[in-house]
């Protein structure tokens, strides 16, 4: 009974996260303190944290939460937490107020869900092998992120449609998105949202 209750609770929380992204399709990705300070003043609801270390990440997340925004931490890029082990997620859960994690490591997804952290699984679409990996992930019952993010985000619209066909997980397009046309192309092709470090795009 408890396991069923926990499953329902996690699914409801994750649905809220997806709805939040759908309502706020431009996500600020920040890679330094300067970018963070700008993002905190923008009309942006979700921030992807792409920098920091085990000492600074609690403070970075705290600033985001105090501004009333969603904080997603890319654990692969946090010095001291980028070891592909579950303990890095335990640290995020127990020592920060982060809403969830971003990672390229599919083995971290299940434990993150158990901790009730929202999850973004990031892929780099460099060749057909990357697409095969997405298809493999879609068939794996133990790996179910809330969102898939793929980079670069300016890939052909037909590629976004292809990914949507093989995976029921909503997708975000990230990387190299520079203007309104890039944003609209990604959204029109089926991406739920885009993430970018480009300050000009945050203001669209």
Image (cartoon, rainbow, N blue to C red):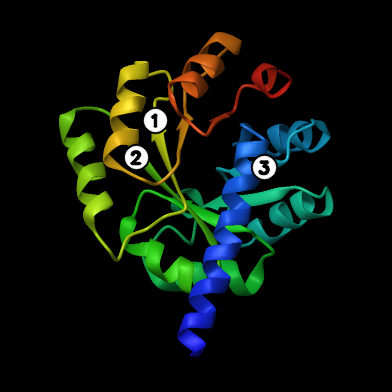
The quarter of the picture where residue 141 lies is: bottom left
Give the distance between the C-alpha atoms of the residues marked 2 and 3, in whole angstroms: 19 Å
Label 1 Cα crowd, 10 Å radius (few <14 / some 14-19 / many 20+): some
Disc 3 secondary structure class: strand
* Residue 53 on image: x %, y %: 57, 55
Quadrant the C terminus occupies: top right
Report how far apart the C-alphas of labels 1 and 2 lie in the structure: 6 Å
Tell me if mark 3 has few (under 14), some (14-19) or many (20+) residues whose alpha carbon lies within 10 angstroms of its own: many
- The residue that mark 2 highlights is 123
Q: Which of the two labelled residues, at mark 2 and mark 3, occupies the earlier sequence position? A: 3
Q: Calculate the distance from the C-alpha at mark 3 to the C-alpha at mark 1.
A: 18 Å
Residue drawn at 31 percent across, 19 percent down: 158
The answer to whether 155 appears left or right of 10 in the picture is left
Asked if residue 176 lies left or right of residue 41, the reply is left
Q: Quadrant of residue 56?
A: bottom right
Q: Is residue 118 above or below residue 115?
A: above
The residue located at (30%, 66%) in the rendering is 142
The quadrant where residue 193 appears: top right
Seen from the viewer's position, the closer of residues 89 and 189 is 189
Instruction: Tell which of 86 and 19 is nearer to you.
Output: 19
Residue indicated by mark 1: 151
- Answer whether labels 1 and 2 touch (C-beta < 8 Å): yes
Residue that mark 3 sits on: 46
Mark closest to the chain's N terminus, 1 or 2: 2
Q: Position of residue 107 (x, y in %)?
A: 31, 62
Which residue sits at x=55%, y=9%? 181
């Amino acid at each position: 009974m408890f396991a069923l209750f926990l499953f329902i609770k996690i699914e409801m929380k994750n649905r809220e996260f997806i709805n939040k992204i759908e309502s706020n399709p431009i996500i600020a990705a920040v890679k330094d303190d300067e970018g963070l300070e700008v993002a905190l003043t923008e009309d942006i609801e979700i921030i992807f944290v792409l920098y920091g270390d085990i000492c600074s990440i609690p403070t970075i997340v705290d600033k985001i939460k105090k501004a009333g925004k969603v904080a997603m931490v890319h654990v692969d890029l946090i010095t001291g937490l980028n070891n592909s082990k579950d303990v890095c997620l335990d640290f995020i859960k127990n020592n920060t107020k982060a809403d969830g994690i971003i990672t390229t490591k599919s083995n971290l997804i299940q434990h993150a869900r158990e901790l009730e952290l929202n999850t973004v699984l990031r892929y780099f679409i460099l060749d057909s092998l990357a697409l095969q990996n997405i298809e493999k992930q879609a068939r794996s019952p133990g790996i179910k992120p809330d969102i898939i993010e793929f980079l670069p985000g300016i890939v052909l619209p037909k590629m976004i449609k292809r990914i949507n066909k093989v995976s029921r997980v909503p997708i975000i397009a990230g990387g190299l998105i520079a203007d309104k046309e890039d944003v609209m192309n990604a959204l029109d092709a089926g991406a739920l949202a885009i993430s970018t470090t480009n300050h000009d795009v945050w203001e669209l």
